[in-house]
Image (spheres, rainbow, N blue to C red):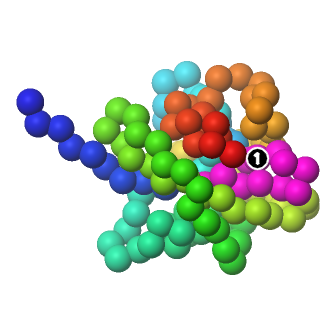
Amino acid sequence: MSTSTRAGVGIVVRRPDGRVLVGRRVAEPGRPLAIPGGKLEGGETIEACGLRELAEETGIVADDGRIFAAALDHGWLVAGVLVDVAADADPQVLEPDKFSDFAWIDPTDPPEPLFPLSAALLAHL
């Protein structure tokens, strides 16, 4: 049996109060809450992918992000990129086929179960 691993990036967007950004993933069964993220493009660094995906999905433009963890689940290896933003960062739903809404949550006490890879990355904060 052959297996393959795909690479992606999960972006943990954190405000000064410690809350992190999650969105409702509309294409997943059960529509779980998840951090923004996506797939690497050719020649792109992990950090650059995180910043690009963040801007594409939420409209939040950040100058800097850093890799802080990685998680493996169901054939996906996802690198976590931590991006600190201002308290007034205001995410917009720019890709409604991926997310229906966004919320700021306490990562230590999410209001409901999270998408597994998001939960795995947030556990490393």
Using residue 37 as the reference point, say whether residue 73 is left or right of it.
Answer: left
Task: Tell me the quadrant of the picture where the N terminus can be found.
Answer: top left
Q: Quadrant of residue 109?
A: top right
Q: Quadrant of residue 58?
A: bottom right
Residue at numbered disc 1: 20
At a point 39% along the width and 47% down the height, the residue shown is: 77
**Regarding mark 1 in the picture, which secondary structure is present there?**
strand
Using residue 64 as the reference point, say whether residue 121 is left or right of it.
Answer: left
Residue 29 seen: yes
Q: Is residue 59 above or below residue 121?
A: below
Magenta stretch? Answer: 11-21
At a point 54% along the width and 51% down the height, the residue shown is: 69
Using residue 117 as the reference point, say whether residue 86 is left or right of it.
Answer: right
Q: Residue furthest left?
A: 1
As rendered, which of 110 and 122 lies closer to the eye? 122
- The percent coordinates of residue 71 (x first, y second) are 47, 42
Task: Tell me the quadrant of the picture where the C terminus can be found.
Answer: top right
- The percent coordinates of residue 45 (x first, y second) are 44, 72
At a point 69% along the width and 77% down the height, the residue shown is: 63
Which kind of residue does numbered mark 1 sit on? Val
Residue 26 seen: no
As rendered, which of 87 and 94 lies closer to the eye? 87
- The percent coordinates of residue 67 (x first, y second) are 56, 61
